[in-house]
């Protein structure tokens, strides 16, 4: 087991930068998620770690083993990296039974006889697939295939576990079960894991840390709570959950990061955290729809940020309503269980839920 | 789990990477040598003043000057082009008509007719030419019968159009194959759109369906054109007796006719044929990039609206039957009958002339029996070797990081530009000048080499689409599990590719069994094959043994095709 280090990892084709200078250290036993929209470079990064994609620059190192170093001309082929990679399609070999699929990496490592059988049995037990050892992949459901794919990578005790959107082919309910099960398994095995997904819920639920990627760059690396509550920019704020953005100018920022922002209409907003920029700079206040409260009467308490607004639209989401408001020229989305029949309302949100980001 | 030792890294040295590279380089290098072996001697000889095995030759353009100074050569060029044009025209009209009637109309028994129109592809061009000769030649059975009944037979196969009829009907199935998939893909809504605007069925067919098939038609037209340029059997059987020379017969008679062949002229003429076909292939390649990469018969199931032939349904069906009877059934029946008679004439009932003499002759001489066993060994063993070799080429081209894999693909497809007779001349010369391979002379292995080289594009084209359908993640996952390139290929891809490899083997077996044109320069006592022995009998005017050998070849083909189908059927569920 070991930590994984990426230094200035890049892949450029001409002017196109698939990945652009990624620096990342994944601690031993950590569960790190690469999160981003499609085309952000997360899968390219994962495949570069596995050795199936060749970067153009930088260093990849696992513990003391250098996998790739562009300056020294080191490129270790995938089969010598001992990385366990689970593909989005699972990539189970259709001409082999579950058991034979698992035996393959062991045969290559010259693990024979009783030892091999024992390890296969253990790995299948681990993913609760022992009764299916003699089945062929096409005889299994998607969820079962996914477990076999995982068992096939765990059976040879890889240094790193690399997962490329392994849950994306499962239906919604199964995905939640598989997510919890996978997280629990990872914690038990304490294996360093890199998980690639575009699903923010998966990322938030499973990760020790999340690296949010956009256009080949890593835009934020932090714990799920921090990513959600202190997004490092408009992209992160909008990609993780969704956010209202209100344009304004920075009025004051204190040393602890709390700040006051003057919106375009003149309303002052207090926020719990802001990046260190000069007063007067253009900024955005980000607040999530589920944190915006609506009230018919003006609240007496002024601990909250308050914006008078007009309801311009309403959609029914089942458990809640989503309202579209116009607050002095700024559009705001709010989610609440209450139904309002008058358009004039007051929107409030706690300063703890307001974050200032750069446009 | 925690107690399991990690052994992978310790066991794998740096050897793995080198092994992959070594295998890839070996395959790429062998393909290059195989394809270059016939080309280099020909190009070299065409610019050298003396036979290439003699010392003291100087580089010169004299061969080309002499070739173009020879007035015969101009008629060779014009005859070849005229024949190719006429053959292409006939093959295309027939092929497109098959495609439309069999794929787009409600013709009865379409499924059966579809397989029947492909039958000529299984029969050697040599056998087709001989069998047409036996029935429709100037003293052929049907010709004499017609003269007897009507006073005159209105055809003469000893003309360009006569030869084009033999060649064109033989190549029509190929045009049909290409146009059929295109006809299946014609979107029915486009035709419906035409119909709503008031166009009738036939009008829609003519103005919408056929133009939509144009890429396939042009592509297969070029293919037939090239095919007829390199056709040897038909010109040899029907052109040579009346002195109409073509590229292939010119090479044939200049290379084999005289006691001392004129090497320079031979080299220059072969080089020019190579250049012409290469240019045509480049044109075709440019069309191919537009028309989609691989043409398959299994178009996706789409809503098909079939044109209603109405009252013409059964007459058209009968026309189809009649056509197949005329171009295939009668000639093959004729050659079969000829093989068991002393001669064939409408003046006497064939049952009075029955004899086993032709077969007895074949089976009583070692050399003749050997030509059959050689053909079988070359087809079974050589076909297997070629299949494995070409399957490995497709792996390197499509599934490796080999630096020259693009170039290797070009090399693999290039033999389409090498006519059989040119390949034969080139390899024959290669054996004369390349040290160390002279031992191959007179063995079946030189035939295996020649046939393998010629068949690379066919098998490559048969295996590639199947290979591309196997997800790359399957071998990538094997790699990340610790398998090197070769292990991943051997244990994952090749087993999954088995059905395609088997189909490629069937194709190669049949084409090795039929092949003759590259063998005419390569055979000598010891490595005769059925085709060369037939040509030898033919040259002596012994039609009976030729017919017997034809029957044997067809019988072997039928047996093999039947066995292969049974095998495929029994393995379908695996």
Image (spheres, coloured by chain):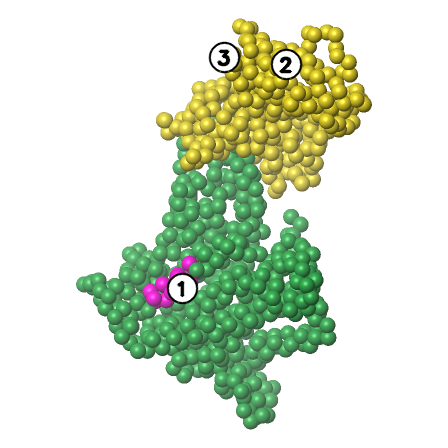
Chain colours: A yellow, B green
- The kind of secondary structure the magenta stretch mainly shows is helix
Both marks 2 and 3 on one chain: yes
Q: Are marks 2 and 1 in contact (CB under 8 Å)?
A: no
For the residues carrying marks 2 and 3, which lies nearer the camera in this image? Answer: 2
Placement of A285 over or under B218, stated as above or below:
above
Does B280 appear in magenta? yes
In this rendering, the answer to whether B233 lies above or below B438 is: below
Q: Which residue is mark 3?
A: A278
Q: How many marks?
A: 3
**Rounded to the nearest whole Å, what is the CA distance between mark 2 and mark 1?**
80 Å
Q: Look at 40% across and 40% down and name the residue there.
A: B21
Q: Are marks 2 and 1 on the same chain?
A: no
Q: Residue at x 48, y 32 (%)?
A: A18
Q: Nearer the viewer, mark 2 or mark 1?
A: 2
Asked where in the image residue B145 lies, by quadrant, the reply is bottom right
Identify which residue is drawn at 40% across, 76% down.
B79
**Residue wearing tag 2:** A267
């Amino acid at each position: 087991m070991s930590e994984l280090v990426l230094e200035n990892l890049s892949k450029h084709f001409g002017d196109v930068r698939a990945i652009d200078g990624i620096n990342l250290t994944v601690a031993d036993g950590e569960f790190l998620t690469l999160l981003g929209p499609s085309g952000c470079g997360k899968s390219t990064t994962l495949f570069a770690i596995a050795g199936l994609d060749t970067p153009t620059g930088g260093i990849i190192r696992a513990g003391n083993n250098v996998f790739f170093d562009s300056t020294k001309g080191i490129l270790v082929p995938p089969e010598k990296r001992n990385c366990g990679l689970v593909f989005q399609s699972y990539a189970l070999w259709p001409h082999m039974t579950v058991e034979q699929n698992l035996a393959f990496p062991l045969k290559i490592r010259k693990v024979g006889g009783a030892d091999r059988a024992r390890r296969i049995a253990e790995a299948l037990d681990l993913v609760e697939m022992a009764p299916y050892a003699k089945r062929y992949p096409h005889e299994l459901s998607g969820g079962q295939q996914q477990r076999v794919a995982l068992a096939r990578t765990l059976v040879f005790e890889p240094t790193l576990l690399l997962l490329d959107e392994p849950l994306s082919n499962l239906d919604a309910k199964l995905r939640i079960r598989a997510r919890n099960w996978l997280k629990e398994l990872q914690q038990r095995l304490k294996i360093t894991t890199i998980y690639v997904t575009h699903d923010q819920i998966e990322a938030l639920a499973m990760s020790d840390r999340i690296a949010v990627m956009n256009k080949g760059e890593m835009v934020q690396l932090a714990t799920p709570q921090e990513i959600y509550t202190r997004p490092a920019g408009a992209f992160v704020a909008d990609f993780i959950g969704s956010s209202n953005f209100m344009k304004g100018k920075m009025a004051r920022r204190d040393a602890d990061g709390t700040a006051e922002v003057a919106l375009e209409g003149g309303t002052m907003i207090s926020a719990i955290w802001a990046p260190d920029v000069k007063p007067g700079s253009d900024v955005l206040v980000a607040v999530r729809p589920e944190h915006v409260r609506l009230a018919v009467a003006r609240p007496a308490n002024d601990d909250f940020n308050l914006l008078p607004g007009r309801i311009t639209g309403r959609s029914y989401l089942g458990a809640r309503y989503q309202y579209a408001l116009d607050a002095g020229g700024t559009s705001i989305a709010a989610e609440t269980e209450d139904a309002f029949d008058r358009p004039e309302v007051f929107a409030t949100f706690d300063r703890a839920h307001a974050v200032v980001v750069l446009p | 789990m925690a107690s399991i030792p990690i052994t992978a890294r310790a066991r794998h040295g740096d050897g793995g990477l080198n092994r992959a590279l070594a295998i890839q380089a070996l395959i790429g290098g062998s393909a290059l040598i195989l394809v270059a072996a016939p080309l280099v001697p020909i190009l070299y000889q065409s610019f050298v003043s003396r036979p290439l095995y003699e010392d003291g030759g100087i580089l010169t353009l004299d061969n080309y000057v002499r070739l173009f100074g020879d007035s015969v050569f101009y008629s060779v060029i014009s005859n070849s082009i005229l024949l190719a044009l006429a053959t292409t025209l006939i093959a295309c009209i027939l092929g497109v008509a098959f495609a439309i009637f069999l794929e787009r109309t409600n013709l009865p028994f379409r499924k059966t007719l579809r397989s029947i129109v492909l039958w000529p592809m299984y029969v050697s061009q040599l056998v087709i030419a001989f069998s047409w000769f036996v029935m429709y030649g100037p003293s052929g059975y049907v010709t004499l019968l017609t003269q007897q009944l009507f006073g005159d037979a209105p055809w003469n196969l000893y003309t360009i159009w006569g030869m084009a009829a033999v060649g064109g009907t033989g190549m029509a199935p190929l045009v049909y194959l290409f146009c059929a998939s295109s006809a299946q893909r014609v979107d029915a809504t486009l035709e419906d759109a035409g119909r709503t605007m008031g166009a009738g069925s036939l009008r829609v067919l003519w103005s919408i369906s056929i133009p939509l098939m144009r890429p396939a038609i042009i592509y297969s037209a070029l293919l037939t054109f090239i095919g007829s340029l390199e056709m040897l059997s038909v010109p040899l059987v029907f052109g040579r007796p009346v002195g109409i020379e073509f590229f292939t017969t010119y090479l044939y008679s200049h290379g084999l006719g005289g006691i001392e062949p004129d090497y320079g002229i031979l080299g220059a003429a072969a080089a020019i044929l190579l250049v012409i076909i290469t240019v045509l292939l480049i044109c075709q390649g440019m069309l191919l990039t537009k028309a989609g990469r691989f043409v398959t018969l299994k178009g996706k199931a789409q809503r098909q609206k079939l044109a209603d032939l109405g009252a013409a349904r059964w007459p058209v069906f009968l026309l189809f039957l009649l056509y197949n009877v005329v171009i295939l059934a009668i000639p093959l029946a004729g050659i079969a009958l000829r093989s068991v008679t002393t001669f064939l004439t409408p003046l006497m009932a064939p049952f009075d002339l029955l004899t086993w003499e032709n077969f007895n002759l074949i089976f009583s001489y070692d050399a003749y029996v050997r030509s059959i066993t050689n053909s079988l060994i070359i087809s079974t063993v050589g076909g297997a070797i070629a299949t494995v070799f070409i399957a490995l080429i497709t792996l390197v081209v499509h599934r490796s990081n080999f630096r020259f894999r693009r170039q290797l693909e070009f090399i693999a497809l290039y033999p389409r530009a090498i006519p059989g007779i040119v390949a034969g001349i080139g390899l024959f010369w290669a054996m004369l000048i390349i040290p160390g391979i002279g031992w191959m002379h007179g063995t079946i292995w030189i035939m295996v080499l020649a046939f393998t080289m010629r068949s690379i594009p066919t098998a490559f084209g048969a295996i590639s689409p199947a290979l591309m359908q196997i997800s790359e993640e399957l071998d990538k996952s094997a790699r990340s599990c610790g398998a090197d390139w070769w292990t991943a290929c051997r244990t994952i891809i090749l087993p999954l590719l088995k059905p395609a490899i088997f189909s490629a083997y069937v194709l190669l077996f049949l084409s090795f069994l039929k092949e003759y044109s590259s063998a005419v320069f390569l055979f000598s006592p010891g490595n005769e094959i059925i085709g060369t022995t037939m040509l030898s009998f033919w040259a002596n005017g012994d039609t009976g043994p030729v017919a017997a050998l034809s029957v044997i070849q067809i019988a072997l083909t039928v047996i093999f095709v039947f066995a292969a189908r049974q095998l495929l059927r029994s393995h379908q569920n695996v």
